[in-house]
Image (cartoon, rainbow, N blue to C red):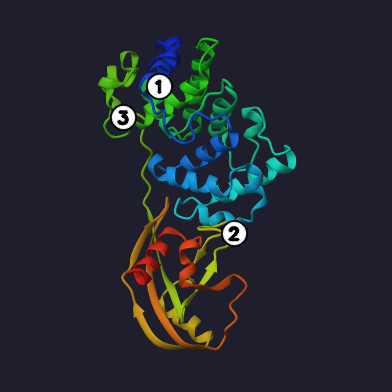
Amino acid sequence: MLGNAQPAIAAFAATVVQWQLRAGRRGLPWQHTRDPYRIWLSEIMLQQTQVGTVMGYYERFLARFPTVQDLAAATQDEVMPYWAGLGYYARARNLHRCAQEICQNWNGSFPPSADEIMQLPGIGRSTAAAIAAFAYGQRSPIMDGNVKRVFTRYFGIFGDPSVRATEKCLWETAQAVVDAAPPDLDMTAYTQGLMDLGSSHCARGRPDCAACPLATHCYARLESRQAELPTPKKKKQSGQRQCAMLILQKENTILLEQRPSPGIWGGLWSLPQFDDAESLRIACGNMGVEVATERKMAGLQHVFSHFKLHIEPWHIVSDQIETTEPRPNQAWVSLNDLPATALPAPVKKILDGLFLA
């Protein structure tokens, strides 16, 4: 449903641009560049992740992989430590694959249009449009989570934004805004301005309508329906899972195993994981582990997007391990090397609490 049938659509883009140039974010490390590699990296990192968290990762990643060629030439094992802790690790795997494809099929340069960029691994329609807008000034509308909030409220677009019909309406409205804008529209300022408004004045919980440059014609403000838009998704019951994790220590090393890719924490090094403590003990017996000390540690809960994982860590120090050669996906890692190892956030928290406390 479209509530604001006759909004001031012609002035929408110009209003956003004027506000962004006056009050929007201007000092982020990925701004003021036309380099599509740097823009692409920032856009991927910012998916599902707050700006404050991304900034340090962005700088460290670029220091190690300053160009798309450097990233393509690296192995996935070399890339993952620079992503560990950011979560949603498929992003990092797709980032690596995408860099390789750009070097193999595009002579090391990003495609020049949003339609072509969207064909690359891990790049959706909105991200492709943002890269094309920031790097090439292309008049391609974006539609990420923050922008959906601005558009649903301003234009009065009802319906779950993740549903195809609602999403189609949002994209059509976004395209109409760009088409109605002046020919000399500053696409960089417009695109950044939409992101800034969505994350600041048009925030999810308590929108600051009094300070919003779009307030005059905003449907949600005029009808006092800010809390109803965007239309909330139907809540699903979060699943619950449990596991036991083994911290098997042999002198100054612990046993880690690389998670399969794709999958949760794919490509990262994690602690061996079991359904329960009994399965963990059986596995230790199969390895010929003679236990010197055994300690059940405090449990830890980690929340994924679709379930909660309850982790029961067991720290076992062994005097002797008969099977000294680990499986192909396992390795004995020195405690001194843990800071440079690509570990999932909860595993890093467990190990830091044990060995750095």
SS at circle 3: helix
Mark 1 or mark 2, which has the lower sequence index?
Answer: 1
| Front one among 67 and 171 | 67
Q: Are marks 3 and 1 in contact (CB under 8 Å)?
A: no
Single out the mark in the foreground, 3 or 2: 2
SS at circle 2: helix
> Where does residue 117 sit, x and y in percent of width and height?
63, 33
Q: Which mark is residue 20?
A: 1
Tell me: residue 239, above or below residue 99: below
Q: Quarter of the image holding residue 68?
A: top right
Spatial CA span between label 1 and label 2: 39 Å
Residue at 46% from the left image edge and 82% from the top image edge: 251
Residue on which disc 3 sits: 228
**Residue type at numbered disc 1:** Gln
* Residue 225 visible within the image: yes
Residue at 70% from the left image edge and 39% from the top image edge: 108
**Residue type at numbered disc 3:** Glu
**Which residue is farthest front?**
63
